[in-house]
């Protein structure tokens, strides 16, 4: 039986050390199987994805009939999922669309950098968690939906320009009237909000926290950025620079490894009796993938609890391929469709916050230079204590 723990990802990880990478647990009346290593996650999510492509029925997603319309609970075999997934892949989150929305992300980035500059000049702290949350939200959706509804017609129809995801959703609403209901599109908006903003902003906050407690790594990143961008404080890293910044990309991957924002992914349902690794998994049971344990498996990662971005330099670990070793974004057909957008946003914000500033921990918010890295488990995993730090302008 599961004790009353606030950190099930850590509890399951400890249990797996004794009971192995595939465990059967009784959670009240529910039988759950927990997968805790890369090989088994590949077997379940990639090789047998048809058996595990539906979410377990959770009360939380049944509010406002969300489970009937939301992409998450729909099985990958259902026609509704296929229509929605196509909209995500070819419209909302396609490379072309992400490129078209770049200017909007840059405008939000500029607002963030202005705010950080003001804090730096006044020598006051930035609440990093809240600030990156706001920027993630605004990068995804503009603040004032109503104003946008009125003004978009001109902009999109006359000029053919997209601002952010809302613009594309409005367009899809008009185009897909026959295939998809208005209700379904409202739930799509809810899905995007739920799936995109917390996950991305929490990863940004964890990345900043890891850099602040690893000054050698932070310095190495600043050197890489100076080498590509020059030491001029007035330049801004753009998305086109990211491919020239492998250490920045490695830092983002290392953060995603150590701090997967959905550490137990979304629980799946076993849809028919199946044998995995000699274990009989029974139809109707819950399947939990412990991405937190997989990211810290000592058989896959050396010194797994330490923040060592260099491990990703020159390595081909991608979050998308069938040889995936990390399951932070899930896997198989239901893999997160927002990987490119999320990793771009995180790299852009992180790179620019580090490029022009050294950061000093706020002595009031944190105990001197000791950074509390405790986490808090909710739908996404948060830093228990929000990161507060003062930006100190670097000399040019
Ligand atoms: C660091 C950032 C992110 C993380 C860690 C993350 C993680 C995940 C995970 C673990 C899943 C479940 C996958 C599975 O069950 O195999 C998922 C699904 C999903 N994510 Fe993300 N996500 C992130 C950012 C985003 C963004 C920016 C968007 C879009 C704006 C997004 C949209 C979605 C959608 C729509 C699904 C449901 C896909 C389906 O059921 O077919 N995510 N994400």
Image: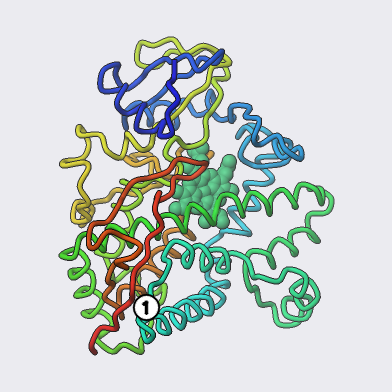
Q: Position of residue 120 (x, y in %)?
A: 36, 82
Query: Residue visible at 40% across and 16% down?
Result: 276
Residue marked by disc 1: 237
Query: Residue visible at 25% across and 79% down?
Result: 228
346 w.r.t. 31: above or below: below
Q: Position of residue 297 (x, y in %)?
A: 25, 34
332 w.r.t. 43: above or below: below
239 w.r.t. 375: above or below: below
Q: Position of residue 87 (x, y in %)?
A: 65, 53
Q: Position of residue 9 (x, y in %)?
A: 39, 33
Identity of the residue furthest to the front in this view: 364
Q: Is residue 292 rendered to the left or right of residue 213?
A: right
Question: Is residue 336 visible in the rendered structure shown here?
Answer: no
Res 1 → quadrant: top left
- Looking at this view, is 180 or 216 the one in front? 216
Res 396 → quadrant: bottom left
Q: Is residue 106 rendered to the left or right of residue 157?
A: left
């Amino acid at each position: 039986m599961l004790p009353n723990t606030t950190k099930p990802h850590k509890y399951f990880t400890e249990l797996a050390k004794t009971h192995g990478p595939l465990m059967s647990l009784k959670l009240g009346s529910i039988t759950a199987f927990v997968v805790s290593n890369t090989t088994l996650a590949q077997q379940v999510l990639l090789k047998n994805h048809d058996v595990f492509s539906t979410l377990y029925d959770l009360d939380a997603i049944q509010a406002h009939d969300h489970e009937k319309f939301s992409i998450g609970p729909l099985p990958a075999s259902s026609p509704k999922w296929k229509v929605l997934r196509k909209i995500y892949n070819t419209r909302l989150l396609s490379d072309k669309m992400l490129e078209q929305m770049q200017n909007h992300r840059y405008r939000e980035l500029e607002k963030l950098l202005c705010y950080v500059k003001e804090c730096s000049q006044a020598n006051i702290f930035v609440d990093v968690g809240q600030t990156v949350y706001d920027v993630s939200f605004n990068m995804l959706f503009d603040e004032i939906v109503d104003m946008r509804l009125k003004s978009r017609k001109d902009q999109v129809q006359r000029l053919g320009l997209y601002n952010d995801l809302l613009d594309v959703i409005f367009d899809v609403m008009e185009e897909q009237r026959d295939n998809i209901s208005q209700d379904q599109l409202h739930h799509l908006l809810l899905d995007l909000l739920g799936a995109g903003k917390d996950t991305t902003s929490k990863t940004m906050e964890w990345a900043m926290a890891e850099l602040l407690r690893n000054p050698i790594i932070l310095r190495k990143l600043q050197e890489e950025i100076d080498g590509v961008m020059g030491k001029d404080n007035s330049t801004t890293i753009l998305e086109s620079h990211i491919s020239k910044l492998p250490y920045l990309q490695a830092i983002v991957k290392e953060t995603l490894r150590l701090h997967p924002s959905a550490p137990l992914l979304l629980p799946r349902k076993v849809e028919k009796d199946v044998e995995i690794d000699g274990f009989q998994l029974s139809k109707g049971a819950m399947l939990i993938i412990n991405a937190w344990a997989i990211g810290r498996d000592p058989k896959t990662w050396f010194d797994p609890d330490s923040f060592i971005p260099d491990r990703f330099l020159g390595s081909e670990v991608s979050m998308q391929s069938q040889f995936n070793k990390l399951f932070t974004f899930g896997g198989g057909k239901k893999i997160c469709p927002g990987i490119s957008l999320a990793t771009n946003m995180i790299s852009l914000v992180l790179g620019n916050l580090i490029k022009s500033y050294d950061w000093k921990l706020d002595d009031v918010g944190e105990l001197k230079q000791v950074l509390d890295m405790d986490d808090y488990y909710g739908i996404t995993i948060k830093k228990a204590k929000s990161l507060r730090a003062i930006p100190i302008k670097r000399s040019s």
